[in-house]
Image (spheres, rainbow, N blue to C red):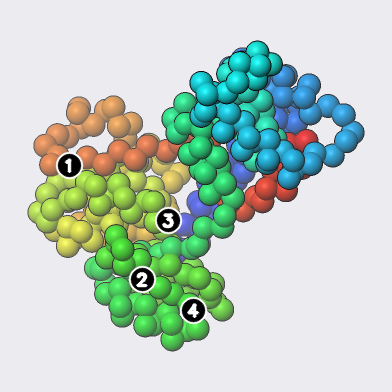
């Protein structure tokens, strides 16, 4: 029953993500009215996309890279080229082309350009199109990574250790059985967790015997990681604002054997009135899904939906 409840909670969370993605897709296609912030940009993009002629993706990609080179070398361009198009005109075309090719809203492309610059934005967008491997975290409260790896390989999985920077991560390249239904998974020897979510806990570096607060804990992967690094000593206060997410949180903590965890459901701003005296606090706040990147959608799928 605990696993079933956790699965239902995860499915509800996934539906929420899909609904948000569908809303963004409908805004892009014009089915829903865009917000005030991106309405003008979407209108300009729609005008450029009008017409029955299909988009030439190769030509579009070539123009994207040409515009990046022009922007990064703008001061050295001939005067006649600068007279034809200003820097802002080239950037606007780059934004529209990237939105069409990669399938993002223009305001996100602008944000990426502001953060990363021109070349790194294109590298970032292209990297998002590659499939990310499934990663799992070995639960050191119950097993060692090499023992878990040997057990999974014995089940026909192709598993490799993430040796470069993680002592507990494993990459699953192929599996003849569902990763979330093996005896090792049900026994709490590992949790399916993205490699990026290891980093907040590693940066926090909790020590045995400390009092640690995980402010946004559900579904429990990071809290269980905290408990493992603390060797089940001290106390991990696993908090989440939404009570409906506590089922999955409790289920994962029990399955993974995090016996030093206390589950709470408070608004994080209320904690100073509830308790104090934490040695460390982890606040890996949930995103709004407005910029969630999912590699399950290919370049062609993004372009078709954008048009």
Task: Say which quarter of the image contains residue 22.
Answer: top right
Disc 1: CA contacts within 10 A as few (<14), some (14-19) or many (>=20): some
Q: Earlier in the sequence, mark 1 or mark 3?
A: 3
Give the distance between the C-alpha atoms of the residues marked 2 and 3, in whole angstroms.
14 Å
Front of the two marks 2 and 3: 2
Q: As drawn, is 198 to the left or to the right of 158? A: left
Check disc 3 and report the residue beneath it: 194
Disc 2: CA contacts within 10 A as few (<14), some (14-19) or many (>=20): some
| Element class at badge 4 | loop
- The answer to whether any part of residue 108 appears in the image is no
Check disc 4 and report the residue beneath it: 157
Give the distance between the C-alpha atoms of the residues marked 2 and 1, in whole angstroms.
29 Å
Q: Residue furthest bottom?
A: 154
Q: Earlier in the sequence, mark 2 or mark 1?
A: 2
Give the distance between the C-alpha atoms of the residues marked 4 and 2, in whole angstroms.
13 Å
| Element class at badge 3 | loop
- The answer to whether any part of residue 119 appears in the image is yes
Front of the two marks 4 and 1: 4
Q: Earlier in the sequence, mark 2 or mark 3?
A: 2
- In the image, residue 301 above or below residue 253: above
Residue 280 image label: 1
């Amino acid at each position: 029953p605990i696993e079933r409840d956790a699965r239902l909670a995860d499915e509800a969370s996934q539906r929420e993500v899909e609904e948000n993605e569908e809303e963004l897709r409908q805004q892009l296609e014009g089915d829903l009215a865009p917000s005030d912030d991106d309405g003008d940009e979407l209108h300009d993009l729609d005008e450029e996309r009008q017409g029955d002629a299909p988009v030439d993706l190769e030509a579009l990609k070539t123009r994207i890279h040409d515009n990046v080179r022009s922007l990064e070398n703008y001061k050295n361009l001939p005067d006649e080229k600068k007279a034809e198009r200003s820097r802002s005109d080239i950037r606007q075309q780059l934004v529209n082309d990237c939105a069409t090719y990669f399938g993002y809203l223009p305001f996100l492309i602008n944000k990426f350009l502001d953060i990363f610059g021109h070349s790194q934005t294109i590298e970032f967008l292209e990297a998002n199109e590659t499939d990310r491997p499934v990663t799992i975290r070995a639960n050191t409260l119950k097993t060692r990574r090499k023992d878990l790896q040997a057990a999974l390989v014995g089940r026909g999985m192709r598993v490799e250790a993430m040796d470069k920077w993680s002592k507990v991560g494993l990459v699953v390249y192929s599996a003849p059985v569902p990763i979330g239904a093996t005896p090792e998974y049900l026994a709490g020897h590992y949790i399916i967790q993205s490699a990026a979510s290891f980093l907040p806990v590693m940066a926090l570096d909790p020590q045995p015997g400390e009092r640690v607060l995980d402010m946004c804990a559900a579904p429990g992967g990071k809290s269980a990681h905290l408990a493992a690094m603390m060797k089940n000593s001290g106390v991990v206060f696993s908090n989440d604002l939404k009570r409906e997410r506590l089922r999955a949180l409790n289920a994962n903590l029990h399955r993974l054997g995090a016996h030093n965890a206390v589950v709470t459901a408070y608004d994080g701003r209320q904690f100073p009135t509830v308790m104090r005296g934490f040695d460390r606090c982890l606040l890996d706040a949930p995103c709004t899904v407005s910029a969630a990147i999912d590699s399950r959608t290919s370049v062609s799928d993004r372009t078709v939906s954008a048009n």
